[in-house]
Each structure stands twice: as C-alpha cells, then as structure tokens.
Amino acid sequence: MSKTVPVDPPADCQLCPRLVAFRDGLSVEQPDWFNAPVPSFTSSAPRLLIVGLAPGMKGANRTGRPFTGDYAGDLLYETMGDFGFAEGRYQARPDDGLQLRDAMITNAVRCLPPQNKPTGPEIKTCRPFLLSTLDANPQVRAVLALGRIAHETFLAALELRKASFPFSHNARHELGVRDLTLFDSYHCSRYNTNTGRLTSEMFRAVFEQIRTHIPPQ
C-alpha cells in the first residue's frame, strides 16, 4: 500500500539531517523565529501555483509565511495584488491580513538551507510534498516557477524531461499533463533586481501572460 504524503512537512520534520541541524542551531540563536518547514500560503481552490526555491533566512524562516519579510516578497505580493491574485496590504508579517485570491505559494524545499543552497538530495527528498500539493489542488492550471531550480524541480516532480521544457524568463510551457501550463520567471530576489536581471516590468509581463491564461472568475 502506498503511503500518503501530507501537503506540508510536519513542524519537526527530520528527513534532511543538514537542514535539521541548521534549523536547530537557529532555534537557539533566534528562538522567536519560525525555524521550521514553512507551510504553503493559499487561497481556497487556487488555479495558480507559485513555486519558489526555499525559505529565506530573514524572510519565511523568520515569519513562517512564504516570501514574507524579505525583499522578494515586496515585489511578489505587489505584483500579485496588481493582477488580482492578492488583496489587502502586504506589511511583511504573517498577521498583516493579506489574503491570496485564486493562488497558492509554496517552495520546492520547505526548510531554510545554509547559504540558501539546498543540495540535490535535499531537493529530491522534499519533492513528494510538492507533488502532494498538486494532488490536493487538482484545479491548478498555471504554475509559476521562480528561478531555474524551482522550474527543474517541478518538472522532475512530474517526471518530465528538462530538455523538453528549457527554462527561460517569461517562457510558457504546455506540459501535456494534468492540464498544466508552466510559466517561468527569474527569481524576484534583491540580487536579481539590483543587477537588472529582473525588472518590475519584466516580472509584470509574466503575470500578464498568466492572467490571460486564467482570467478572473
């Protein structure tokens, strides 16, 4: 009999020893931080799934909500609000009252990795949670991968060949499974925006494609 995998890891998940050790060390240094696998942030019955790489140290690992507390969240939630995927005022804290509309945000790796760099085995170990997230939300029609690793991890979760769907900013891929369309964007990190690799206009262009694919209900 197959084992049912929960959508989110338990708060005391022990699957990745390196990540557990890092998390435990931070719990001593910063006992007021979340310091646990970060659960997905979602509306009811989302049609858009946004997949990031992993929680940021002073962002989601501190606050317990994806893309909350660091610069990446500023750009992400502002853009989502402009396109009707979020409502309320984002104030970089999980009790700010911000709500998603027709959207869900998760990470390929749910725990904070050292230097924000999960290993290949850690990404693979966390992959069943990503697949369970999809299974629990069969109405999802659009997936936005923030960065190449998120893109490749999502393809691997669906057992699709990377070479068939190469990553490129603002690319659109008809996956041919689960009626899913995959959209790509450079990650909305401070580094990418500071260097000009990603501008707000470039990020909005991705959401324009997504909104055309799944019009407001």
Image: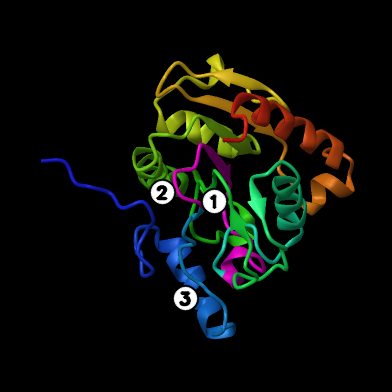
Residue drawn where x is 58% and y is 19% of the image: 173
Mark nearer the N terminus (2 vs 3): 3
Residue drawn where x is 69% and y is 46% of the image: 80
Q: Which residues are magenta?
A: 43-63
Q: Is the image coloured rainbow, by chain, by secondary structure, or in one colour?
A: rainbow
Q: Nearer the viewer, residue 18 or 83?
A: 83
Separation of marks 1 and 3 at Cα, in angstroms: 16 Å
Q: Residue 206: image x %, image y %?
A: 73, 31
Residue type at tag 3? Asp
Q: Which mark is residue 24?
A: 3
Q: Residue 139: image x %, image y %?
A: 42, 34
Residue drawn where x is 46% and y is 34% of the image: 140
Q: Which mark is residue 126?
A: 2
Separation of marks 2 and 3 at Cα, in angstroms: 18 Å
Mark nearer the N terminus (1 vs 3): 3
Judging by the rendered image, the residue that carries numbered circle 1 is 118
Q: Which mark is residue 51?
A: none
Viewed as shown, does residue 175 lie left or right of 6?
right
Q: Nearer the viewer, residue 121 or 33?
A: 33
